[in-house]
Amino acid sequence: MEVRARFNPSGVGNPEILQGGDALKVDREYVVLEVFAPIERSPEFRIEFIEGEGSALFDSRAFTVTSSLLPPSWRYVQFATGSFSLRPEPWGRPGFWDAYYDGDPQAREIFEVEKRRILSDS
């Protein structure tokens, strides 16, 4: 099971929505690795835009969801701000994303293990 979404920027008039979208391929279907819903903003999808090298959050309004089956490894996390996330539990550890983006090998391995779990559950 996995959430999948097709990058479909046509008709999106606000350039803010497409921020970072140049890293994605138009009409390509991506596996959504996390859903983050910040308070008072549109939800964002974590997409791996370069396999094994980079993932980021992208505005969900630039996508069309093609499969909405939630992976069993995802957990609901509520933040004090009212924002919430659906993601693998290890990704929520304090400092995880900082370590991941800094290239920490352990954080990268945790990311890859959880990504494989999401993909294997499909």
Image (cartoon, helix red, strand yellow):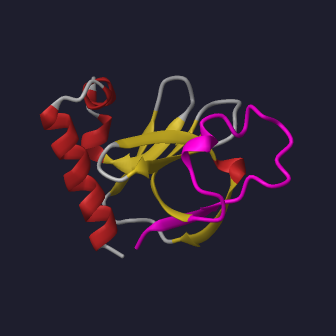
Q: Residue furthest left?
A: 106
107 falls in the magenta region: no
Extent of the magenta region: 1-28
Name the image quarter holding the N terminus: bottom left
Of 98 and 26, nearer the camera is 26
Residue 81 is at least partly visible in this image? yes
On the image, which quarter does residue 91 sit in? Answer: top left
Q: Quadrant of the C terminus?
A: bottom left
Q: Please state the horizontal and vertical placement of residue 97, each as a whole percent of the image.
A: 33, 30
How many numbered discs? 0
* Camera-side residue of 53 and 90: 53
Q: Is residue 8 magenta?
A: yes
Q: Position of residue 45 (x, y in %)?
A: 54, 48
Q: Give residue 63's quadrant in the image.
A: bottom right
Of residue 94 and residue 101, the one placed in the foreground of this image is: 101
Q: Give the residue displayed 27% in from the left and 24% down from the top.
A: 102
The secondary structure making up most of the magenta span is loop
Which residue corresponds to the image point at 66% horizontal and 34% vertical from the top-left? 19
Q: Is residue 44 left or right of residue 32?
A: right
Q: Residue at x 23, y 29 (%)?
A: 103
Residue, x 38% and y 41% (percent of image)?
Answer: 54
Image vertical order of residue 43 relative to residue 75, above or below: above
Residue 94 visible at all = no
Q: Position of residue 117 (x, y in %)?
A: 25, 63
Q: Is residue 19 above or below residue 45?
A: above
- Percent coordinates x, y for residue 69 in the rendering: 49, 71
